[in-house]
Amino acid sequence: MSPRKTTSQELTREIILEKARTQFVEKGFQQISMRSIAKQLGCSHGAIYYHFKNQAELFYAIVEDDFSKLNNRLEETIQGSEDASTKLYNILIRFIEFGLNHQSQYEIMFMVRNTEVDSLSQVAANHSYQMFAQTVQSLSKKKLEIIDVWSAFLALHGFVSHYRGYVGNFEEAKLAAKSHVNFIIKGLNG
């Protein structure tokens, strides 16, 4: 057994987030405690409380961090110099790419449900979805109804959900992803 870390300064927020993320995905929110995360990290649970006041705050920090990464990828695409059609394609394909290249994060962001943390994670999810919806609306060739954008999102989510766990990364499903995105775009622009 490795010696325990004695100070909370040795333990970074990022290290805690990564270890906790893995445990939340593998065992579920209810099965994980601050003590079990500390045990995996080889530190006292007090060291984790230095960074997070409770399990729900830790979970929310993970979700918020993951949505921030997705939002940054989408923002980079929006800021690109491509035309609107190419940007729309890239927004949709990068969503799938993120989901398949970061499967454990995607699962926490979109699939873990728990009444204790749903309201917290919904804030980050709603912000991300609003960004997605506004971008898709602005890049589409026609005025879209809310249901059109929601259907496009669900189609992307369904694709990621279907392939998650069956492929190791985006490259393994790239051809199918490109075809799926083109199908969605026909529906949005048709």
Image (cartoon, rainbow, N blue to C red):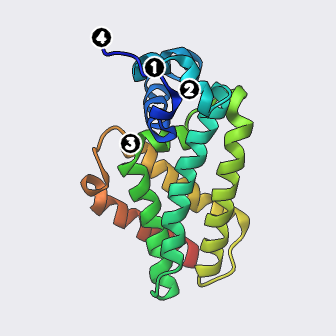
Residue placed under numbered mark 2 in the picture: 48
Q: What element carries label 3?
A: loop
Foreground pick, 132 / 60: 60
Residue placed under numbered mark 3 in the picture: 164
Q: What element carries label 2?
A: helix
Marks 1/2 in contact by CB < 8 Å: the verdict is yes
Q: Does label 4 or label 1 sit earlier along the sequence?
A: 4
Residue placed under numbered mark 4 in the picture: 1
Residue placed under numbered mark 1 in the picture: 43
Residue extending farthest to the left is 172
Q: Does label 1 or label 2 sit earlier along the sequence?
A: 1
Q: Residue drawn at (42%, 71%), measured in percent from left and top?
A: 182
List x then y, in percent, for residue 170: 32, 55
Q: What residue type is labelled 2?
A: Ile
List x then y, in percent, for residue 116: 71, 26
Q: What residue type is labelled 3?
A: Arg
Q: What residue type is labelled 1?
A: Cys
Quadrant housing residue 109? top right
Q: What element carries label 4?
A: loop
Q: Does label 1 or label 3 sit earlier along the sequence?
A: 1
Q: Is mark 1 on a helix, strand or loop?
A: loop
Q: Give me the C-alpha separation between circle 3 and circle 2.
A: 30 Å
